[in-house]
Amino acid sequence: MNCRHCQTPLEHVFLDLGHAPLSNAYLSEAQLHAPETTFPLKIFVCHSCWLVQTEDYAAAHELFSSGYAYFSSTSQGWLKHAKAYCEKIAEMLRLTRDSFVIEVASNDGYLLKNFVEMGVPCVGIEPTASTAEAAERIGVPVLRYFFSAATASMLAANGRQADLICGNNVYAHVPDINDFTLGLGILLKPGGTVNLEFPHLKNMIAQNQFDTAYHEHFSYLSLTAVSQIFEKTGLRVFDLEELPTHGGSLRIYGCDKDDSRQTTAAVTAMLACEKRLGLQASGLYRTFQQKADKVKNDFLAFLIEQKRAGKLVAAYGAAAKGNTLMNYAGLKTDLISFVCDAAASKQNKFMPGSHIPIRHPAELAKRKPDWVVILPWNISAEVMQQHEQIKAWGGNFVVAVPELKVLT
Ligand SMILES: [Zn+2]
C-alpha cells in the first residue's frame, strides 16, 4: 500500500492489533449466532510525510451504514465544548446574518444548533441518515452527502461557499484526506476560515492511547503531516490551539495560502515541538507497539486477579475505543460481565467481537459491580460524576489507558 497523502510505499508498521470487527458494528441477539467479519487492524507510518494511517480494507460505505450509532449529543461535556467554540469563533470572525457556516460531519446538530440560535445561516453536511434526521428535528439544515472535492464543487457552483467551515473529529475519519482537504479549499469564500479539530498524534503516543485505533479512524494526525497536506491543496495552517478533548486534540485554523493573515508563533512552535519529540523520524514510531502491549497486559492481569477474587467487573461506555481495547485483549463476558451506555441506540445490543452485552446505566444499581472500567477514558470525570452512587456499595472506577489506574 502507498501513503494516502504522498504515495510513498508504506514500509514502517506503527501498530498491529491483529484482526478486529468494525468498531461500531454492534450486534443484535440474532447476529450472535452468525459468523462475524473481522478486518486486519494495522497502522503504518509514512517515512516521507509522517502521515500515520490504517491499512485500507473496509469500504467507507460499509463503515458508515445507517446503523452507525454514534450521536454526539449523548455527551454533555461535548455539547458544552461545542457551544463554547461557537460563541468564541462567532465573535472572532464577527459572524452575522450575512455570514455562512458549513459544518462537515454535522452529526445530530450538536454544534450547528448554536449558530441557528445566534441567527447565523448554516448548513451541515452529513451522510448518516439517523443523525441527519435528529439534526433536522432541532432545526439544523442538513445536506446528506459524503464530503469530497466533488461535493464542494457542486455547492460552490450553487453559490454556497462559506465564511467558516468547521469539522470536529471528522478529519481523521476521512479515507481520502487529499480530496477532502481540496474540498475545504473549494468551499471556502475568499478570506474564509477552516477549523478542524482532531486528536493529536503527539498525545496518542505520549499517553499510550492505542485504543483510539480502529478501522474508521484512517489517519492519526500530527501538525507536521497536516501542514503538508494543507500546503499541497493550496491552504495554510495559520494558527492552532491545543485542547484537552479526546485525550489531547489540536484545533487548527486554516485559510487560503495567500490569505493576509500571518502564520502565528503557535504553529511554528508546535512544528518544532513535534520535531524535538521525534515525530519527524522513524525511531519513535517503532516503540509504540510495546507501549500498547504493556497497557493490554496490565489490564488483563487486573481482570484475571478480580475474577479469581470473585469480584464483579462491568464497563461503562460502549465506545469505539472500548471495542479496540477489549478485542485486542481478547475479552469475553467471563472477565467483563456487561457494559453500560447512555445511548438508547446501543442498549440491548452486544459489543462487536467480545459479545459483551450493552445495558442501560440503571443496570449498575441493579447488579452493583465491584469495579466499573470506564472505556472512554476521555470522559471519565463526567462518567464518575454521573454515577458516583457506585461508591454506596463499595464500587470503584478504573481506567486502562494511559495505564491501569483506580480513579478516586
Ligand atoms: Zn506520505
Image (cartoon, rainbow, N blue to C red):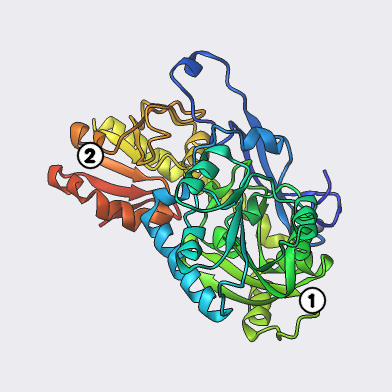
Label 1 secondary element = loop
Question: Relative to 386, is 346 on the left or the right?
Answer: right
Query: In the picture, which quadrant includes the N terminus?
Result: top right
Spot occupied by residue 249 in the image (x, y as percentages of width and height)? 54, 64
Q: Which quadrant does ligand 1 occupy? A: bottom right
Residue shown at 51% from the left, 28% from the top: 353
Is the residue marked 2 within 8 Å of ligand 1, measured from its CB?
no
Pointer 2 residue: 370
| In the rendered image, the vertical position of residue 187 relative to residue 309, given as above or below | below
Residue closer to the observer: 16 or 198:
198
Where residue 336 sits, quadrant-wise, is top left
Type of amino acid under label 2: Asp
Pointer 1 residue: 257
Where residue 284 sits, quadrant-wise, is bottom right
Query: In the picture, which quadrant includes the C terminus?
Result: bottom left
| First of labels 2, 1 by sequence position | 1
Few, some or many C-alpha atoms within 10 Å of disc 1 (few <14, some 14-19, many ≥20)?
Answer: some
Label 2 secondary element = loop
| In the rendered image, the vertical position of residue 96 relative to residue 244, given as above or below | below
